[in-house]
Image (tube, rainbow, N blue to C red):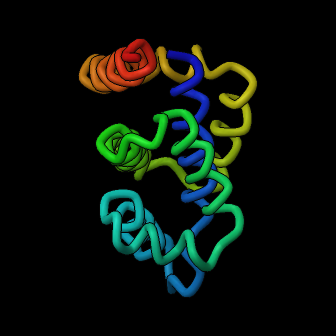
């Protein structure tokens, strides 16, 4: 679970600093959720932004190229991001930086539903790795 938790953090930390062109924090947060949830928008951003590409390549590596698991990770990241909407951006960046050093602690702060989704994604990835 810690490896997926780390990639969840990577995605959140990258996308919480985006997107450029947003006029206020509320708009930036909405656009960020849209990027996380909408594969087409996300893929367009990935084509233009080296950090987004780097994050996505790590997710693809983790998921073994499974589009279903890749999308599930982004959906979970969007859900966690939405839960943080009341936290000021600067404070959220601090939380994410601290969490990079301790992803298990970060994952322990997820809701039970989010923890179950995280476990499900991890199990799906592990099951695919075991297949010949």
Residue 29 percent location from the top left of the image:
43, 65
What percent of the width, then of the height, locates residue 21?
Answer: 55, 87
Q: Residue at x 64, y 36 (%)?
A: 95
The image shows residue 3 at horizontal and vertical percentages of: 58, 23
Q: Is residue 45 left or right of residue 51?
A: left
Image height check: is 53 above or below 121? below
Residue 103 x/y as whole percent? 62, 22
Along the viewing direction, whichever of 54 and 96 lies nearer the viewer: 54
> Of all residues shown, which one is farthest toward the front?
132
Q: Is residue 43 visible?
A: yes
Q: Residue furthest left?
A: 113
Q: Is residue 119 above or below residue 53?
A: above
**In this picture, residue 69 sits left or right of residue 15:** left
- Point 54% across, 47% down: residue: 12
The one of 77 and 83 positioned closer to us in this rendering: 77
**In which quarter of the view is residue 90 placed?**
bottom right
* Residue located at (55% from left, 59% from top): 15
């Amino acid at each position: 679970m810690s490896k997926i938790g780390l990639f969840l953090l990577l995605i959140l930390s990258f996308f919480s600093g985006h997107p450029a062109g947003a006029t206020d924090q509320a708009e930036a947060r909405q656009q960020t959720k849209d990027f996380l949830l909408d594969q087409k928008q996300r893929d367009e951003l990935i084509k233009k932004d080296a950090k987004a590409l780097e994050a996505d390549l790590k997710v693809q590596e983790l998921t073994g190229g499974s589009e279903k698991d890749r999308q599930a990770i982004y959906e979970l990241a969007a859900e966690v991001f939405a839960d943080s909407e009341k936290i000021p951006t600067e404070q959220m960046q601090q939380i994410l930086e601290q969490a990079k050093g301790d992803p298990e602690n970060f994952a322990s702060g997820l809701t039970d539903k989010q923890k179950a989704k995280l476990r499900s994604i991890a199990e799906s990835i592990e099951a695919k790795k075991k297949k010949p």
